[in-house]
């Protein structure tokens, strides 16, 4: 790792990668399906939205063209209304459930079929980094993608915050990217699952069922898929009537960061109309985000918008507030102290849920395990708030988990053992990119107008 750290900001050839870095690259190449990458060959055989964007960072270390292809293929599946779906079914594959027939989006998504929901919009943040590697070489490719990002970000406010509250909602736990977070337990409990019927989950044919969401969770997931399909994924109907409608800090923080990065790129590339729209959206989101602060819990938490109830526990998404932009110094200090305490309770951080909470489960998907890409985002935000030692602890923890348990989907914070899928793309990508860019900072000086101002304000 030290050799690559010294080569920060340098483009490497595949032949120059050795050891863990070469294995990470080989996983990306092995999961490459020609322009898009699957997260894990057996468990997730299609293109997933935020997986794909983050995978581009790993490719960028040794193949910039392939990195750009990844985000271009993702955004090519954008719906006419601006949404970029969370799954793109590029080919028929019966091993995954729910597939295109359950989503019922053929008339909307056209070709290829997709799911009916989105995922956290990390693409703008990734594209800014790809552009920063060589602005002259990639200016034209970035310029073609900015209008797509602009439309997607606008879709979030139009479809998921139609009342102008300043926080975007999710209508399905999968939309957050963190499927079985304990935050969803109470909002999901109000959903009628009597009409779901029988189905066969294929994920537990591949992965130990103790590492996956429970069957009761899946009944609620499928009830929400049915709700969306029955209304033909009409965003107005969903906003008014979907029984699951919550705002959570992870999604909102990633969108706020994405808007900042879009403003940087649009300003640099002379797309002033996009910069102006993104600036207006960001002002609304920055103000609205404060609704997620809970003085009782001492951090940013999920808000059930149907019942105006805050969640009672912190999650790994809570720390993404510092990834989103400047946090009030007193709050940032408090959050760093709480995170330090969390890390003292486990062998490896950052657990996806409070390790002292009664609902913590160290190996069941998002109810406790450590995820490499969330760690990278948390560490980036910590560095931008001056918490460099804490950020480095998280980086070292992440690599120690990979060294111990290989490139698994996620890791137990107590024992370090891996869980979920094997040879996982975004784990490999984060390991490779973090080794090449150990400082985790996103941007070179000429792309950091808003980033620099944010750091100075903190």
Image (cartoon, grey):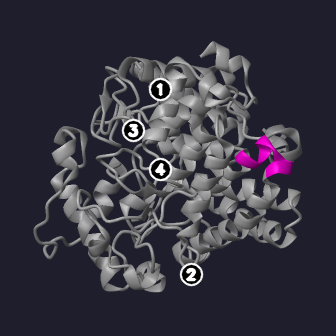
Check whether the beta carbons of the residues at disc 4 and disc 3 lie within 8 A of each other.
no
Helix, strand or loop under label 1: helix
Q: Position of residue 93 (x, y in %)?
A: 28, 61
Give residue 353's mark: 3
The quadrant holding residue 162 is bottom right
The residue that disc 2 covers is: 80
Residue at mark 2 to residue at mark 3: CA–CA distance: 36 Å
What residue is drawn where x is 10% and y is 68%? 198
What residue is drawn where x is 48% and y is 60%? 119
Using the image, determine if residue 156 lies above or below residue 39.
Answer: below
Check whether the beta carbons of the residues at disc 2 and disc 4 lie within 8 A of each other.
no
> Closer to the N terminus: mark 4 or mark 3?
4
Helix, strand or loop under label 4: loop
Q: Position of residue 32 (x, y in %)?
A: 47, 47
Q: Residues within 10 Å of mark 3 (few under 14, many from 20)?
A: many
Spot the residue most to the front.
Answer: 15
- Between 83 and 241, the one nearer to me in the picture: 83
The residue that disc 1 covers is: 23
Helix, strand or loop under label 2: loop
The residue that disc 4 covers is: 37
> Closer to the N terminus: mark 1 or mark 2?
1
The quadrant holding residue 243 is bottom left
Dominant SS of magenta comes to helix
Residue range (magenta): 130-137
In the displayed structure, does residue 400 sit left or right of residue 337? left
Q: Residues within 10 Å of mark 1 (few under 14, many from 20)?
A: some
Residue at mark 1 to residue at mark 2: CA–CA distance: 39 Å
Using the image, determine if residue 399 lies above or below residue 41.
Answer: above
């Amino acid at each position: 790792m030290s050799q690559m750290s010294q080569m920060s900001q340098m483009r490497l050839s595949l032949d120059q990668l050795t050891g863990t870095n070469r294995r990470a690259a080989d996983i990306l190449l092995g999961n490459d399906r020609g322009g898009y990458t699957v997260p894990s060959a057996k468990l997730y055989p299609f293109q997933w939205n935020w997986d794909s964007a983050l995978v581009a960072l790993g490719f960028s270390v040794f193949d910039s063209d392939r990195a750009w292809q990844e985000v271009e293929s993702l955004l090519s599946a954008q719906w006419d209304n601006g949404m970029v779906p969370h799954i793109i079914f590029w080919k028929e594959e019966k091993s995954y459930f729910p597939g295109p027939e359950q989503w019922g989006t053929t008339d909307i998504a056209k070709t290829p079929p997709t799911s009916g929901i989105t995922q956290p919009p990390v693409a703008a943040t990734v594209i800014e980094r790809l552009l920063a590697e060589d602005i002259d070489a990639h200016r034209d490719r970035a310029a073609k993608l900015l209008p797509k990002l602009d439309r997607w970000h606008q879709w979030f406010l139009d479809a998921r915050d139609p009342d102008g509250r300043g926080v975007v909602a999710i209508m399905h736990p999968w939309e957050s990217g963190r499927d079985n977070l304990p935050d969803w337990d109470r909002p999901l409990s109000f959903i009628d699952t009597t009409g779901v019927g029988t189905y066969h989950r294929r994920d537990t044919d591949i992965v130990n069922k103790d590492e996956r969401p429970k069957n009761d969770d899946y009944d609620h997931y499928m009830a929400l898929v049915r709700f969306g399909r029955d209304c033909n994924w009409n965003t107005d109907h969903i906003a008014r009537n979907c029984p699951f409608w919550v705002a959570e800090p992870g999604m909102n923080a990633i969108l706020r960061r994405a808007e900042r990065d879009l403003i940087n790129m649009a300003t640099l590339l002379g797309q002033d109309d996009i910069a102006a729209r993104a600036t207006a959206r960001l002002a609304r989101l920055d103000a609205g985000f404060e609704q997620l602060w809970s003085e009782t819990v001492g951090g940013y938490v999920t808000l059930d918008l149907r019942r105006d109830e805050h969640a009672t526990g912190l999650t790994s998404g809570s720390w993404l507030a510092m990834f989103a932009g400047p946090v009030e110094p007193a709050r940032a200090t408090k959050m760093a102290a709480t995170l330090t305490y969390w890390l003292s309770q486990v062998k490896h951080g950052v657990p996806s849920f409070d390790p002292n909470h009664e609902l913590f489960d160290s190996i069941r998907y998002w109810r406790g395990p450590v995820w490499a890409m969330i760690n990278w985002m948390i560490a980036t935000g910590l560095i931008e708030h001056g918490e460099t030692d804490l950020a480095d602890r998280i980086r070292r923890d992440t690599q120690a988990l990979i060294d111990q348990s290989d490139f698994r989907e996620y890791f137990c914070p107590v024992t370090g053992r891996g869980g979920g899928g094997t040879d996982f793309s975004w784990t490999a990508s984060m390991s490779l990119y973090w080794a090449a860019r150990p400082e985790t900072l996103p941007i070179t000086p000429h792309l950091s107008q808003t980033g620099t101002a944010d750091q100075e304000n903190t």
